[in-house]
Image (spheres, rainbow, N blue to C red):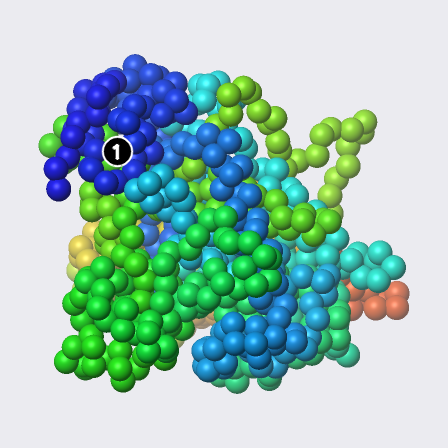
């Protein structure tokens, strides 16, 4: 294809910006003139030196890394993540064009709602022949149990996304409708935050429509939808599949941004037709769920019986009118690619007008005429499953591309269409417009080049039920210059979409304007699952730190003696083996498992966890894995443990200093205190035992990080009495059992239902006697047997925590 240079290159970086004939471009119009909406941006961009451009782009990338923005990769590692692929140059559209786009998509949103209401209501579109009955009945997304259930609030669809592209003639068309659980709105916010680091100048920021107003409007709609009859407030929440989902980061980000609970299916139960949240204070009523899981998995009783992420009885709560879902269960049927073959005609039937923005030309191959057309024009078709909900260019969405079969057992497309026509759809292999993108050459000759793009537009209902549109969004940018939609399968990047006005725009914010006085919001409800993960996060972190100190003690002594059969080393090996840790590996796999267990707990409470804390845990895990490949026994392993120790104590410091003192912090702190108590009792029972080899008291003090404290406190040679006194009975030593027991008693007093009809609850009743006995004990009273008994008492305290709050 012949390419022509732009008529007015504004900068050397644009020297290679070649326009392709027959392809629309966002920077230049059909006459080759720069679009006015881009001019001021290009003028300012052209003033930047290559070094300054690189620095600004790195600033944005660093923001995304610091903010923890990632896209989950599906792999054997449930925590595998990859960095968010930001395309640093935004897509810029004028607000007049954006309003035209939104007007067309508003019509489409109303059409999708009307089709949903019919499919789960009277079914006239099928009975009158506008939709094939076999197509709808064959879709896994059409959920028969939901037929006849009127949605609470009157609407099936509350939030939508549309993937659109620009055709060669400059008009827009729809590539796909996202109705099931639309993703990307949170990532659009983060894209905007990142590009704000690249272009901090007043212009263009003052002329760019902000995104916060969209979210504020939708939050108000959710709050109204959640209200019970009579105006009683009930909770609103986001329902997520969990950390293994590819867009889990977005779920946590939006939950924090909007102040919503982030729940998983196990957080919910249904009682007498009412959905309830399991919390540390008992079940609490729920009014609305913003669903981010596929509908079939929502209820294993009435929908997919194999689902392990749903809530039994959820459909019952919806049927009773006590729970609103955003969007309704079964809305995924509107994403079915074959639906696009019928929407243009349905719009004329239901609305009496054509679609203002057409969708990609689509033919369902269940009819002989359509099947023949697709067969005769296969070279410019994307052919795939009629029931697929992927966008046409998503990897795996099409089985035949450009007349070439991929992965079918058929000898030809013609045979395939004849045999399976009702299951197939053909869609035009459209040409996309191009937009400026930053291309790194690898040689330092970085430049701006055109790349194909699509734009995702987000719509949501306001509190009155009308559609409102995000004034911006995000664009998918192709990796190569190939402008066919097929090229988007090869992946690429995402860009911010600026909707620009001719004059400064209103600077919306999600935060209310300040009033006289200050109103503090409640920390909110703490689901029992969140409390459980915070509690075990505290335990796993403490357990990891304890293991690191023990492994370091082993390798320091191995380096000093060079005798693996030293009595102290044998005792240390046996002690570690009791926890599944082998010393044959300088950085044992069991240690890495403990770190990953902590990360797993933290991942499940990302909405309640600081970005810095998460980054610190991730860095700890990366470092441990790296060191496991290189560390050698002895001094090298000891140095590795010292590095890991500094990193995990840094994480602990972040949590202690920065985490808000709400009930979640209480559970995390309680978990740490309990685990440290158990670890100290185990260390003392082993290394302060009368039969322990010489030098083991030093190990106990070293592992308890109390060497200097012992020197200052006793000014005498170590003995079992001084070590036990310091590590078991000193109430001022944070590394003592008594200190941690007292801490647990204080933390238990801050938990809900700490008193039962005026007397201490069971948890406190279990802790107080232990604290009392230790407070009056002498070192000689703390025998090895007493320490083992103490460990059993600590285990019972853990059971009481679970029974009282986490079960």
Q: Is residue 13 above or below residue 150?
A: above
Which residue is nearer to you in this view: 712 or 622?
Answer: 622
Image quadrant in which you'd find residue 337: bottom left
Looking at the image, can residue 14 be seen?
yes
- Residue at figure coordinates x 21%, y 25% from the top left: 6
Q: Is residue 664 left or right of residue 646?
A: right
**Residue 726 lies in quadrant:** bottom right
Instruction: Decide if residue 722 is on the left or right side of residue 321.
Output: left
At horizontal 30% and vertical 35% (from top left) the residue drawn is 25
Quadrant location of the C terminus in the rendered image = bottom right
Crowdedness of circle 1 by 10 Å Cα count: few (<14), some, many (20+)? some
Q: Nearer the viewer, residue 125 or 537?
A: 125
The number of callouts visible is 1
Q: Return the x and y of residue 725 as percentages of the image width and height.
A: 56, 57
Location of residue 129 in the rendering, given as x and y in whole percent from the top left corner: 52, 76
Q: Residue 786: percent from the left, percent from the top?
A: 58, 73
Occupied quadrant, residue 782: bottom right
For the N terminus, the quadrant is: top left
Residue at position x 58%, y 37% in the image: 212
Residue 648 sits above or below residue 582 on the image: above
- Residue that badge 1 annotates: 438
Q: Say whether residue 77 is visible.
A: no
Q: In what element is the residue under mark 1?
A: strand
Name the side, left or right, on which 622 lies relative to 474.
Answer: left
Residue at x 53%, y 37% (from the top left corner): 99
Percent position of residue 375, x then y = 23, 71
């Amino acid at each position: 294809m012949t390419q022509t240079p732009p008529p007015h290159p504004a900068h050397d970086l644009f020297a290679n910006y070649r326009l392709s004939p027959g392809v629309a471009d966002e920077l230049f119009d059909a006459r080759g003139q720069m679009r006015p909406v881009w001019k001021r941006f290009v003028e300012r961009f052209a003033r930047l030196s290559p070094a300054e451009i690189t620095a600004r782009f790195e600033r944005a990338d660093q923001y995304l890394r610091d903010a923890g923005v990632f896209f989950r990769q599906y792999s054997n590692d449930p925590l595998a993540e990859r960095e968010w692929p930001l395309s640093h140059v935004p897509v810029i559209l004028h607000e007049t064009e954006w309003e035209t786009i939104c007007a067309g998509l508003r019509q489409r949103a109303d059409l999708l709602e009307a089709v949903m209401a019919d499919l789960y209501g009277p079914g006239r579109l099928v009975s009158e022949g506008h939709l094939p009955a076999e197509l709808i009945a064959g879709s896994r997304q059409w959920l028969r149990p939901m037929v006849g259930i009127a949605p609470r609030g009157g609407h099936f669809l509350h939030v939508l996304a549309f993937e659109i592209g620009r055709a060669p003639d400059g008009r827009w068309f729809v590539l796909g409708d996202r109705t099931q659980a639309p993703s990307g709105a949170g990532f659009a916010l983060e894209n905007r935050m990142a590009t704000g680091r690249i272009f901090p100048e007043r212009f263009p920021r003052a002329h760019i429509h902000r995104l916060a107003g969209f979210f504020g409007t939708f939050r108000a709609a959710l709050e109204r939808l959640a209200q019970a009859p009579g105006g009683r407030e009930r909770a609103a929440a986001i329902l997520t599949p969990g950390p293994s989902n590819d867009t889990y980061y977005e779920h946590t980000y939006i939950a924090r941004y909007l102040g919503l609970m982030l729940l998983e299916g196990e957080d919910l139960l249904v009682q007498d037709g009412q959905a309830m949240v399991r919390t540390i204070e008992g079940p609490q009523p729920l009014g609305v769920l913003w669903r981010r899981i596929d509908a079939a998995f929502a209820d294993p009783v009435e929908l997919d019986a194999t689902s392990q992420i749903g809530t039994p009885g959820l459909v019952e709560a919806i049927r009773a009118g006590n729970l609103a879902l955003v969007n309704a269960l079964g809305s995924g049927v509107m994403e079915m690619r074959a639906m696009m073959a019928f929407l243009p005609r349905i719009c004329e039937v239901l609305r009496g007008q054509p679609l203002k923005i057409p969708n990609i030309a689509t033919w369902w191959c269940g009819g002989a005429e359509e099947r023949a057309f697709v067969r005769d024009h296969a070279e410019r078709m994307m052919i795939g499953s009629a029931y697929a909900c992927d966008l046409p260019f998503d990897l795996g969405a099409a089985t035949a591309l450009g007349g070439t079969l991929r992965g079918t057992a058929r000898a030809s497309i013609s045979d395939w269409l004849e045999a399976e026509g009702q299951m197939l759809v053909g869609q035009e292999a459209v040409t996309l417009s191009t937009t400026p993108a930053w291309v790194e050459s690898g040689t330092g000759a970085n430049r701006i080049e055109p790349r194909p793009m699509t734009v995702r537009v987000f719509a949501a209902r306001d509190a009155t039920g009308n559609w409102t549109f995000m004034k911006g969004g995000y664009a998918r940018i192709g990796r190569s210059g190939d402008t066919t939609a097929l090229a988007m399968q090869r992946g690429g990047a995402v860009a911010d979409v600026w909707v620009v006005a001719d004059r400064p725009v209103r600077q919306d914010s999600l935060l209310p304007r300040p009033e006289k006085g200050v109103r503090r919001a409640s920390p909110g409800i703490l689901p029992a699952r969140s409390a459980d993960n915070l509690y075990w996060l505290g335990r796993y972190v403490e357990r990891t730190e304890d293991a690191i100190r023990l492994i370091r003690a082993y390798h320091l002594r191995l380096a000093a003696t060079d005798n693996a059969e030293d009595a102290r080393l044998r005792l240390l090996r046996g002690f570690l083996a009791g926890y599944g840790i082998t010393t044959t590996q300088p950085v044992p796999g069991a240690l890495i498992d403990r770190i990953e267990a902590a990360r797993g707990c933290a991942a499940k409470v990302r909405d309640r966890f600081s970005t810095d804390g998460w980054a610190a845990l991730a860095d700890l895990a990366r470092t441990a894995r790296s060191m496991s490949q290189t560390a050698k026994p002895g001094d090298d392993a000891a140095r590795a443990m010292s590095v890991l120790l500094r990193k995990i104590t840094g994480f602990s410091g972040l949590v202690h200093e920065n985490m808000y003192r709400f009930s979640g912090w209480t559970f995390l702190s309680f978990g740490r205190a309990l685990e440290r108590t158990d670890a100290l009792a185990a260390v003392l029972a082993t290394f302060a035992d009368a039969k322990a080899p010489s030098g083991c008291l030093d190990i106990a003090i070293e592992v308890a990080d109390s060497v200097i404290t012992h020197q200052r406190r006793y000014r005498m040679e170590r003995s079992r009495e001084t070590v036990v006194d310091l590590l078991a009975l000193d109430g001022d030593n944070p590394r003592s059992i008594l200190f941690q027991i007292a801490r647990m008693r204080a933390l238990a007093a801050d938990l809900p239902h700490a008193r039962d009809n005026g007397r201490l609850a069971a948890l406190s009743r279990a802790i107080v006697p232990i604290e009392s006995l230790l407070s009056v004990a002498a070192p000689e009273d703390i025998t090895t047997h007493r320490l083992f008994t103490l460990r059993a008492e600590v285990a019972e305290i853990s059971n009481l925590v679970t029974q009282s709050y986490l079960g």
